[in-house]
Image (cartoon, helix red, strand yellow):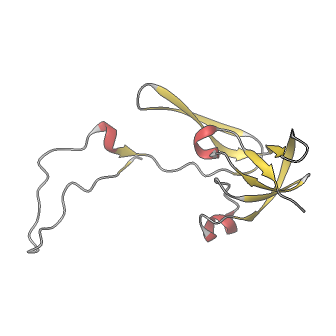
Amino acid sequence: MKKSIENLCGRKYTGGRKIAMRGRRKFEIDRYPNEAVIGSNLKVTRRVRGNNNKTALKTVEFANISNPEEKKTTKSKVLRVIKNATNKDYERRGVITKGTVIETELGLARVVSRPGQVGLINAIQLKK
């Protein structure tokens, strides 16, 4: 089910009804967000405006961890979500978004990519 962004019919300041002069447009339709959680890798590809494709993660097992001191990037298993500043509920449910601090086999890392729109997790390793 797709939800719409714009509310075409509301109320006047007097309290009277506003009647929409037109229906919804295709470009006004929004989709529910894909919230990446920890599990075996599962990707969803969907067509978006401009005949482009977006690959979103439903569940993720591995992340690309960059170490700025060693200038090296390695693939590491994601163990759990430590902190998610976006939403406390996301933190409790283990949803991974941009800016989330995750625990990996290499240590703590902060996510710098957008898993719901890019389809992979890139993260920077935090200092111990």
x and y percentages locating residue 43 in the rendered image? 66, 37
Q: Is residue 18 left or right of residue 43?
A: left
Question: Could you say where residue 110 lies in the image, as x and y percent from the top left?
Answer: 75, 55
Report the front residue among 94 and 86: 86
Quadrant hosting residue 87: bottom right
Q: Which residue is located at x 8 percent, y 74 percent?
A: 14
Q: Return the x and y of residue 83 as percentages of the image width and height.
A: 72, 66
Residue drawn at the location 29% of the way across and 53% of the way down: 6
Tell me the residue at 72%/44% (across/down): 121
Q: Nearer the viewer, residue 81 or 127?
A: 127
| Residue farthest bottom in this picture | 14
- Residue 10 appears at what percent x and percent y? 19, 63
**Quarter that holds the C terminus:** bottom right
> Is 61 on the left-hand or right-hand side of 42?
right
Position of residue 66 in the picture relative to residue 21 (left or right): right
The number of numbered discs placed on residues in the rendered structure image is 0
Q: Residue furthest front?
A: 69
Up-down relation of residue 7 to residue 117 (above or below): below
